[in-house]
Amino acid sequence: MFHTPPLVFSTGADSQSSSSLISRMAKVLGFLVLALSALICEAAIFKPISDSHRSAALELFTPAHGSLSSLEETYEALRTFEVLGIKKQPDQRAATCATVVDTLSSPTSALKDLFQALRVNGLLNCELNKKTFAGIAPRLKDAVKSASSLLDYYYSVGSLVLIKGLNSDVNVHLESADSVVRAIKALSQSDGRWRYSSNNPESSTYAAGIALESLAGVISLASSEIDQSLISMVKNDISKLLDGLEKYDDGAYYFDEKLADAHGHQGPLSASSAVVRGITAFAAVSAENLNLPGDKILGLARFLLDAGVPGNAKDLYYQIEALASLENNRVSIPLILSLPTSVLSLTRKDQLKVSVNTVLGATAPSLTVKLKQIFSSGSKDASVIDQDLNFDHKNAVHYLDALPKDIDVGNYIFTFEIVLHDSEHKMIYATGGRTKALIYVTGVIKVDNAEISVLDSDLGNIETRKKLDLAGKNSISLSANHLQKLRLSFQLTSPLGHALKPHQAFLKLSHESKVEHIFVVGNSGKQFEIILDFLGLVEQFFYLSGRYDIQLTVGDAVMENSFLQPLGSVALDLPEAPEKAARPPPQAVDPSSRFGPKAEIAHIFRAPEKRPPSNLSYAFLALVLLPFFGFLVGLLRLRVNLKNFPTASAPAAFAILFHLAIAAVLSLYSLFWLKLNLFTTLKALGFLGIFLLFVGHRTLSHLASTSAKLKSA
């Protein structure tokens, strides 16, 4: 019988033993993660360019304000769209061609601007006449002669090559091509890298790439054959450059750029891309075969594909441009073996399928894929298969009808080999020998003999036993005290009858107060068992008696029927907690509950007071109105008249408005008494008060002036 130690994860538990066990488990999990990472790196599968790259290109190269910021960015966008075959792209031809024409027509344009404008024109075919190119060519030839840095050669020579491709009638040939090659070669270093100028002692791998492109351009522009000794020296530099390649465990090769300066976007991706473009460009114009190792060319392709979908436009351009150079070159065309899926189900009887394409996804030449070996994960022993995969011409995939009969659920490393049918293709394509692929084989795991029991602590006798159906629903109800034990056991069997040790097997007990305790279920062969001795767990349970919900979790990457199964509950009767015993930790508050609907507030208003009799109210109203009638009588007794009312039109209008404003104020008071609230009344009274003050002042001023004139008369 396998007895699992009580490895407990409880919310807030801070016992030393629990922390130690958790620390040990974390170390084990960390080791497993590192081992799995190493396994994946060793058996990585690279996939050719896909629709994800096309979607990323449309997103990254979409202009934010209607147009891209420079001709360089415009070329990178257009070139990326062209290689990826994207037809629907932002229409900027008119505005871009206008910039191209202005740049090529300006005598003050920098070499870099001319180079970028010619590259963009090569893709857009802007309306340029022969005179435009004929006017630029002499200036570019002079720039080649007076060049003092590698970038000067790169832009001037590259521009002449572009003009040659756009208009063959323009004379772009270099008379002293050997001297130009020597000048560029003088900037090379012993390790195959290049300097940007003779004044800069730092060398760069990226500079080596643009140097090779420049040399290729010089060779294509030479009016006579280049000295073969110079070509041999460049070939030697390329070999030294490839000797400096860094290598990953998955067979990917890359150049580690150590120089970061202002010459452009630096990094392993840009450096590797530049060298790939330079080597393929030089091989295209060289009369001799470079005889470069195909595994390194394939390794560079794997590194470029391993970058996935870059997150910025510059890296995406570098990746796509380099892969386009490898797609059709005179050195070696890489063939990429990929799997449509790395998960095979024994339940569905999935077929093993393999695709072989070029880096851009083009169809590979006639070939056969052999399944050579199958390694079980974590084992050095291999099953030697050496079986040819069938080829589906309709879907262009190689497949295996059925997996070997001894393949059970688990992780496996399949080893493949590509065999070209045509012997001449071996000189053209790079297959890289054997390719390893990590494959997960899944299946339905059989769960048997599941039961849960309450045992007597002293003799281990079974007091209560319940059968469990872990594939269905369970709702068992148990009771135990601190002198008893809880045992859970079950068996896991693979489709071939082997024992399966899942990645996760946890038993969780949740108290009514939301305090949770998680235990790791151990195994011995096919049998999984855990025994909880409540006497030794009372402190970790915080002496909390009551109902505990039981939940079992079993899961694995290769287990198609992983489950998280509520089993029922157990009522625990634990002793009272001592005074110094640890208390349950406070439970975390759900942040969403703070912003949820609040409880409705029920308020009971006080019952209204009993009103006085109506006769008393009317009597009070009469007393209130009595002073008003007294005021009217007083006016009559004083013989009030309208003799002093203004007769002129303007003063009379102000006097009428004055009296109307007084009446409006009195009406507002009445409305306040009947229906208006204080704030509305004060707002209206503010406007009426200002108006009353204005018209009253004009009226009283008129009366005062009239009285003064009468007295003076």
Image (spheres, rainbow, N blue to C red):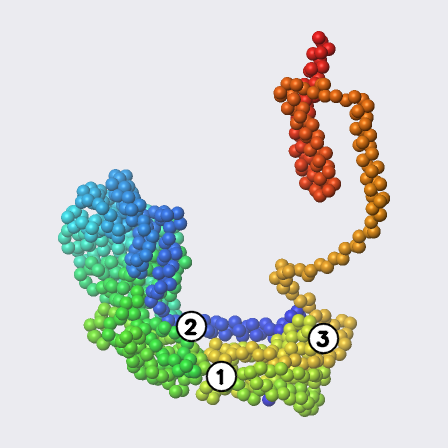
- At mark 3, the secondary structure is loop
Left or right of 549? Residue 319 is left
Q: Mark 1 points at which residue?
A: 445
Residue 481 image position (x, y, % from top left): 72, 83
Task: State how far apart marks 2 and 3 are (Cα).
Answer: 46 Å
Q: What residue type is labelled 3?
A: Leu
The residue under the point 64% across, 24% down is: 653
Q: Which image quarter is the N terminus in?
A: bottom right
339 to the left or right of 619? left
Mark 2 touches mark 3? (CB < 8 Å): no
Residue 350 at x, y = what percent?
A: 38, 80
Residue under pointer 3: 544
575 horizontally vs 566: left or right = right
| Amino acid, disc 1 | Ile
Reading the image, the residue beneath label 2 is 40
Q: How many marks?
A: 3
Does 62 appear above or below 453? above
